[in-house]
Image (cartoon, rainbow, N blue to C red):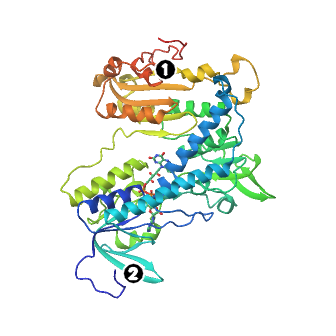
Amino acid sequence: MSKASAVHLSFMYDLIVIGGGSGGLAAAKEAARLGKKVALFDYVKPSTQGTKWGLGGTCVNVGCVPKKLIHYAANIGTILHHDTSNYGFEVTSTFRWSNLIQTVQNHVKSLNFSYRSGLFSSGVEYINSLANLEDRHTVLFKRNNEIMKYTTEHILIAVGGRPNISESVPGALEYAITSDDIFSLSKPPGKTLIVGASYIGLETAGFLTELGFEAIVAVRSIPLRGFDRQCSEKVVSMMKEYGTRFLEGVVPINIEKIDDELKVVFSNGYTEQFDTVIYATGRYPDTKYLKLNEIGVHLTSNNKIIAPNDTTNIPNIHAIGDVVDGRPELTPVAIKAGILLARRLFGNSKEFIDYKYIPTTIFTPIEYGSIGYSSEAAIAEYGEDDIEEYLFEFTTLEIAASHRYKVESSRMDSGDFYMSPNSFAKLITVKSLDNKVIGFHFVGLNAGEITQGFSLAIKLGTKKSDFDSMIGIHPTDAEVFSDLSITRRSGESFIATGGCG
Ligand code: FAD
């Protein structure tokens, strides 16, 4: 530790990491494991509504972890309300938002603690301060109102991103919340408007709907931009059957507080009142405080760091995770990038991440997992004639037996109002590459688990004939991938008629 006036003859650290999220923590611990002297800065600036949290970054505190726990709670709600009595249980239930939030926050806090102790036991020095750069080897921060300087051979920037809220919409900054706030909200959100149909918007709308809140999504253009269109439409249609409402082609233009409610005026003139408004309109890189421009680090026009191969234009300044231009904004990507970077810098490794065929899953009520190309991207790259799409739509056995109803018809006693098939499977192959599978898509229960399993095969370059020779596990949803024979090109119906084969 040194004060601003001190002169350094050599660097104090081998590596300073700025950002204690998924990527930064992984890189810091790996560098320390390789025998290096490492310090890590992590500091959370409060959200627009004043929410703060502990060590671990977005995923643990306001992302993957609390989201998945609430998704689980929401799925319990659906099973309780739709399936239990048909499976023999007579259950009456009362849902308490405060109990759910307490469970989620208790778990998050236990993870904050384990990250702190993990850094300690790895020998990484943790500093809970906002850091910025003085020059390419010097990091500045405040301690007890004094400016401190640490010098280092390498700097790793892993500061992630934060949610956007439109500053041009009157009332938005003042009244709207974001994913930074929802997972610790002290009172139930009530009737909620979700602005934006990104994956975070749809996941939020999905869990609120399943928990029994009225959830309405304002979609400016198309939901789940960048994902396979047919699968995205399936996700949205299932959400509608669960009871989520969609306002198409609109954005809020004014938000005003009237008594305890938020009156929202939309771009088409329509108005409606809500208890809560959540913005889920993308995220911006958290680079503003670092003064990167001043020391010459190249940024994109939207302030993402340009770091091909995880190193910037300044050779000792590196960057990983959500803050880097062109990277999939996913925790396992940030973690893997951090570990591999540390090994390249300090462990003689030459290994880089392979960004092809990274699996991902959207945790909507009916999940959607995907690997590789969407139909649209496959056709754009290989041409329509060279692409084959294998499709199948079916109902999960357990849901079929419990006769799940569409929400709007839940009091009707007619088979006509049962939910549509809840599962949709799609493989995309390239004919000229011996039917190599370049796209795997599954909308269905446990899509996250299923997609992770198949991701190894897709990464290893599996062919459609390998899928065909696979023996299924019966009765499961995933077994459908051993028997996909209906192509989109054929025009045949790809909706199952039921039964076991
Ligand atoms: P972060 O985890 O964002 O960490 C950056 C850290 O740096 C933060 O703690 C920040 O406060 C700190 N920091 C910033 N500036 C400074 C500074 N100047 N000095 C000190 N500290 C600073 N990914 C998945 O893989 N699966 C999911 O299901 C999933 N769900 C998500 C759900 C939501 C609602 C959100 C918002 C994200 C989700 N993600 C998911 C994305 C995932 O959280 C991110 O990809 C991941 O956290 C990125 O890690 P990172 O290391 O780049 O940055």
Q: Which residue is mark 2?
A: 148
Give the camera-side residue of 434 and 155: 155
Please tell me whether residue 354 is drawn above or below residue 425 in the rendered image. below
Nearer to the camera, 389 or 206: 206
User: Which residue is farthest left?
Assistant: 348
Q: Position of residue 105 (x, y in %)?
A: 56, 55
Amino acid on which disc 1 is placed: Phe
The reply, left or right, for residue 264 in relation to residue 291 is right
- Residue 242 makes an appearance in the image: yes
Residue 255 on image: x %, y %: 72, 56
**Residue 109 picture location, percent across and down:** 51, 58
Q: Which residue is the extreme one toward the bottom?
A: 5
Q: Which mark is residue 436?
A: none
Does the image show residue 20? no
How would you rate the neighbour count of disc 2 (Cα within 10 Å): few for under 14, some for 14-19, many for 20 or more? some
- Asked if ligand 1 lies within 8 A of label 1, the reply is no
In this view, the mark in front (1 or 2): 2
Mark 1 to mark 2: distance in Å? 61 Å
Residue 22 vs 138, above or below: the answer is above
Name the side, left or right, on which 364 lies relative to 157: right
Identify whether 117 is placed above or below 243.
below
Q: Dot 1: what SS? A: strand
The tag earlier along the polypeptide, 1 or 2, is 2
What residue is rendered at 59% in x and 24% in y?
399
**Which residue does the numbered mark 1 point to in the structure image?**
392
Which amino acid does the dot numbered 2 rest on?
Met
| Image position, residue 245 (x, y; %) | 68, 38
